[in-house]
Amino acid sequence: MQKIENYINGELIAPSSGNYIDNIEPATGKIYSLVPESNDKDLETAIVAAEAAKETWANTSLEKRAEILSKLADLIDENAEELAKAEAIDNGKAVTFAKAVDVYRSSANIRFFAQAGTQFASESHAMGNLAINYTLRDPIGIVGCISPWNFPLYLFTWKIAPALACGNVVIAKPSEVTPMTAYLFSKLCIEAGLPAGVLNILHGTGPSIGAPITTHPKIKAISFTGGSSTGAHITKATAGMFKKLSLELGGKNPTLVFADCDFKETVNEVVRAAFSNQGQICLCGSRIYIERPIYEKFKAAFVSQVNSLRIGDPLDEQTQHGATVSKSHMEKVLSYIELAKEEGGTILTGGKRAKVQGRCQDGFFIEPTVIEGLNNQCRTNQEEIFGPVCTLMPFDNETEAVTLANGTQYGLASSVWTNDLKRAHRVAKNIEAGIVWINCWLLRDLRTPFGGVKSSGVGREGGLEAMRFFTEPKNVCIKY
Ligand code: NAD
């Protein structure tokens, strides 16, 4: 059985406790590797390594840092096939999706921030003839990066790349549910010549190693992506410690389809928005509001398109819809489908565990599920399900659509489908979300602010926002 190792001080090492947890392949339900159960002791070893590397990395030239990061991005591209396969096995996602989205974006993230580091400028404020202010933006020191399982390498690199580009040293924790690509990545770090201690990757569960990272006094900033309840927990655990916190949390994203949309393209894209990665994307549009005159027509076309999604072995290149990430997650999603029925919903398609023959017969597959007949206030429409489940609801006018869209505690992303330019601008302005896509979904420019409002998070990632988060501004005021 393959044992994943921690990456500390430039070396791959076993956890100090000698304890491991099972790593299960979601498509088969079988244990296929072991994950270190790291603890405070491993964290202390990593902190010592990070402390020793801190000053040198902060003083390494921007060009040199960019060179090492670019080499890492190149190595990801060179190993794209292996990484995509590893992601498909570890997470259950379709291998073609893993290659086109996860692996592609992982190297893009690193390449983007390698360049951003060399372009990042700080501010200057002149006070007439009196004085000039300039702002230094220094690395923070040791920062913690904690990431979830839905885009294991993609979201991992989305955090560590800006942190490293800004000259910080990093203690990172990937999800214990999908640790494999972070482990393969640590080997690429060694190959790329990343100096020892600059990045340390500790594997294990939230309680065993995530929580100690968030509360360690030497870790001055935490960049976290995960569930809103974990985000709330981290906020409480770090209260009074004066750490910088960036929290990218859950979503329950609305999709607003107006009658004047480009019908065919909208159906295609709204299906993609609901079911990509088995609905396990924080940005997935799971509440779909449709203007009443086209409701029935849209419903029929939407359900027909959903029924054409190919469910199967994630390693089969024809597969579009793979397994959900774990047994417990599958059971949670299935329990929400039962809840939707109890709440009066009608299942239009899907609604149960999917059976895939052969090596995947015990896998955690769920049929893409579409539900109608629910009101906006029911739990199915209020709570994040994070699986292949969406609801359809009609609306009568723009005001109602916006009210429905804003009617949850979340505010991460949204999409609006219309050919009325004025309405598009109005709705975009009035939606409570960090991201509004008009006539598109998941079209990403890495320079734009990324994150949510309300229970979907605090702070923004992406572009300059990330560079600002991972640096400490110091203003210097000089009197003439
Ligand atoms: P999770 O909150 O359970 O875990 C996320 C990470 O936090 C994991 O590495 C986990 O081990 C760690 N963790 C758990 N408890 C911890 C603690 N007490 N202290 C420190 N770390 C702890 O989330 P998940 O189930 O892995 O991911 C799914 C969630 O992530 C969904 O809610 C989804 O919407 C959200 N998500 C948000 C974004 C975004 O950008 N807003 C992106 C992807 C996923």
Image (cartoon, rainbow, N blue to C red):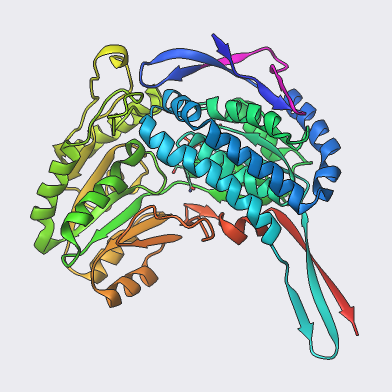
Against 76, residue 242 (above or below) is below
Say whether residue 61 is left or right of residue 224.
right
Residue 65: image x %, image y %? 73, 47
Q: State the quadrant of the N terminus.
A: top right
21 is within the stretch colored magenta = yes
479 horizontally vs 7: left or right: right
Give the quarter of the figure containing the C terminus: bottom right
Q: Quadrant of residue 160?
A: top right
Residue 225 visible in rendering = no
Q: Position of residue 373 (x, y in %)?
A: 15, 48
The image shows residue 478 at horizontal and vertical percentages of 88, 78
Q: Residue at x 29, y 30 (%)?
A: 335
Residue drawn at (36%, 57%) of the image: 414
138 lies left or right of 253: right
Q: Nearer the viewer, residue 359 or 110?
A: 110
Where residue 212 sits in the image (x, y, percent)?
69, 33
Above or below: residue 28 compared with residue 328? above
Number of marks in picture: 0
Find out whether residue 87 is within the magenta segment. Answer: no
Q: Which residues are magenta?
A: 9-22
Q: Point out the residue furthest to the top here.
A: 1
The image shows residue 292, relative to residue 301, as above or below, that is below
Q: Nearer the viewer, residue 365 or 216?
A: 365
Q: Is residue 16 left or right of residue 336?
A: right
Q: Is residue 215 visible?
A: yes
Q: Most extreme residue toward the right, as rendered? A: 480
* 384, 174: nearer the viewer: 174
Q: Residue at x 28, y 51 (%)?
A: 287
